[in-house]
Image (tube, rainbow, N blue to C red):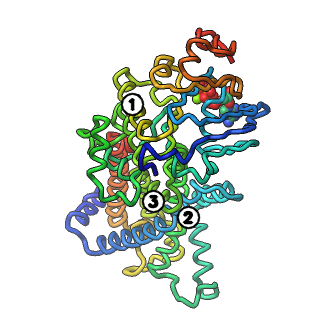
Amino acid sequence: MDALSEAFRLIITLDEDLFEILWLSIRVSLSALTIAAVIGLPLGTYLAITRFPGRKFCILLLNVLMGMPPVVVGLMVYLLLSRAGPLGWMGLLYSPTAMIIAQAVLITPIIAALSNQVIESLHQEYSDTFYSMGVTGGRAVAAYLVDARYALTTCILAGFGRAIAEVGAVIIVGGNIDHLTRVMTTAIALETSKGNLTLALSLGAVLLALSLLVNALVIGVREYAQKRQYA
Amino acid sequence: MLKSANMPNPLLPICISGLRLIRGDRAVLAGVNLTIDEPGITVLMGPNGAGKSLLLRSLHGLITPDQGRINLGSLTVADSRTEQAMVFQQPVLLRRTVLQNLAFAAPKTAKTDRQRLIQALESVNLLDRADQPARMLSGGEQQRLALVRALLGEPALLILDEATASLDPASVLLIESLVKTQNVQGTKIILVSHDQGQARRLADEIVFISNGQVAEQSPADRFFTEPRTPEAKAYLAGEIVV
Ligand SMILES: Nc1ncnc2c1ncn2[C@@H]1O[C@H](COP(=O)(O)OP(=O)(O)OP(=O)(O)O)[C@@H](O)[C@H]1O
Ligand SMILES: [Mg+2]
C-alpha cells in the first residue's frame, strides 16, 4: 500500500525521472507511428484498389507480419544495427533512433493491414461509381483516404496503442539505458525485477491511463463518424 | 459535352451486335443485337434476371463482354466514357456533405463555379440541405443528389438502372421531370424500369429483353397497345416469365 501511495505522489508531483521516461516513450512511439502511417496508409490503400498478380500474397504477408512477436522484430533490427550487421556502421544500436526503427517495423504492417481492410470495403462500395465518374489514379487514392478518414484514424490509434505498450523490441535494440533509452515499459520491467515497485507502479498507472485515453478516442471518433453516417 | 439540343448527339446511333456474356455455365447475355438511333427516351423492360442490368453495365463499360461489339456513334465504349453517366438503383454518395459531393463530381474547369452547384441543388430541392452529411439524406433525396451529380458533366448519354424503384411518388415525378428536361436538352436517356406507368410517361421507345436477348423493340405507344411477342404480352399482363 505504501508503494501505491508513493507511486501516486510521483505522478502528482510531476517527478522529473518519471516524466523524462514518459516523454521519451511518447517521442519514440509518435515518431515510429509517423513513419508507419506514411508507409502503411498508402501501401494498404494501394493493395486495396489495384489488381495485380501476387496482390493476395502481399496482403497475406501483411497479416502475418502484423502478428509478429515484438521480440522477433527486436532481434531482427538488432542484427541489422549491431556492429557486425549491414547497418552497423551507422552506430545506431542502443539509441532512441534504434527504438523508433524497431517500433516502426513492428507497427507498419499493422497500419497497412488494418487500412487495407477499411479501404477494401469502401472500394467495393465506390468502385462502380468512381469508374462512372472517371475518378482514377491519384485522385481515387486521395478520395479513399479522405472518405475513410475516421476509420483510418482508429487504425492509427491502434498502432500507437501497440507501440507505446510494447516492451520486447525496444528493450533489445534500446538496452534500457537510464536517461537515454529508458521508456515506460522497459523501466517497469527493470524496476519490478529490482524490487522497486514505486516507480514501476506509477509508470504502470500512467501507461494504463494512456491506453484508456487512446481507447476512449477510438470510441469517440467512431461515434462521431457513425452519427454523421461517415463511418 | 453537349452544347445544344440542335446538334446531333455524338453517341448515336448506339450499335450493339452479337453481345455475349457468360456467367458460370450460362450465357446471361445470349447474343444481343440492338440498334438505338432514337434520340428520345429508351426504356428497357423485361422480367427479373433477363439481363437488363448486365446489358447497361456493358454499355457503360463496367463489365467487358465475352463476345460482340458496342459502338456509340463513331466511338467505342472506352472512348465514350467521359460522355456517359449512370445512376444506379442504390445511390452511392461520398462520406461528405451534399455540396461537397457535387463539387467532387464537377469538371475541374468549373471548380470556381459555385453558383452552378447551388443551381443544381435547387433543381432537386436540396439547397437547404447543402451542408448536411449526404448519407443522412433519405433514400429519395440521395437519389435526387445522385442524379444531379450525374448531370453535372452534361453527359451525352445518361443511363438509369431502376433509379426510382424505391422512391415515393413525388420523388419519382421530380426525377422523371428532370430526366425529361435533360432529354429535351439533347442528352440521350436509356433507363430500366418495371413500372409500366413510368414507362408510359417517359418512353419514346421500348426495348423488351428476355432470356438475355432482345425480344422486341417498338415505339412506346405500339408496345403497350399491341405487344408482338408472347413474352411481352405475358409480362404486361403480370404473368411470371423468364
Ligand atoms: N456474377 C454472376 N454470376 C452468375 N450469374 C450472374 C452474375 N451476374 C449476373 N448473373 C445472372 O445474370 C442474369 C441477368 O442479371 P441482370 O442483373 O442483368 O438481370 P436484370 O434483367 O437486371 O434483372 P432485374 O430486373 O431483377 O434487375 C441473372 O439471372 C443473374 O443471376
Ligand atoms: Mg437489374
Tell me the subunit letter for badge 3. Answer: A
Residue B114: image x %, image y %? Answer: 28, 53
Q: How far apart are marks 2 and 1 (CA)?
A: 58 Å
Which badge, 2 or 3, comes first in the chain's sequence? 2
Describe the element under mark 3 as helix, strand or loop: helix
Foreground residue among A147 and B161: B161
Q: Nearer the viewer, mark 2 or mark 1?
A: 1
Quarter-of-image position of residue A8: bottom left
Pinpoint the chain carrying mark 2: A
Residue at disc 1, secondary structure? helix
Q: Are marks 2 and 3 in contact (CB under 8 Å)?
A: no
Amino acid type for the residue under numbered disc 3: Ala
For label 1, count other residues whose C-alpha is less than 10 Å away and answer few (under 14), some (14-19) or many (20+).
many
Q: Disc 2 marks which amino acid? A: Pro
**Same chain letter for marks 2 and 1:** no
Q: Is mark 1 within 8 Å of ligand 2?
A: no
- Residue at point 28%, 42% (across, down): B132
| Label 2 near ligand 1 (CB < 8 Å) | no
The image position of residue A181, as x and y in percent, is 42, 78
Which class describes the residues within 10 Å of circle 3: few (<14), some (14-19), or many (20+)?
A: some
Q: In which quarter of the image is ligand 1?
A: top right
**Residue at the front extreme of this rendering:** B6
Rendered position, A144 above or below A167: above
Asked if disc 2 and disc 1 are in contact, CB closer than 8 Å, the reply is no
Kindly state the secondary structure of the residue where label 2 is placed.
helix
User: Residue under circle 2?
Assistant: A70
Disc 3 designates what residue?
A142
Is residue B71 positioned above or below B235 on the image? below
Name the disc covering residue B175, or none.
Answer: 1
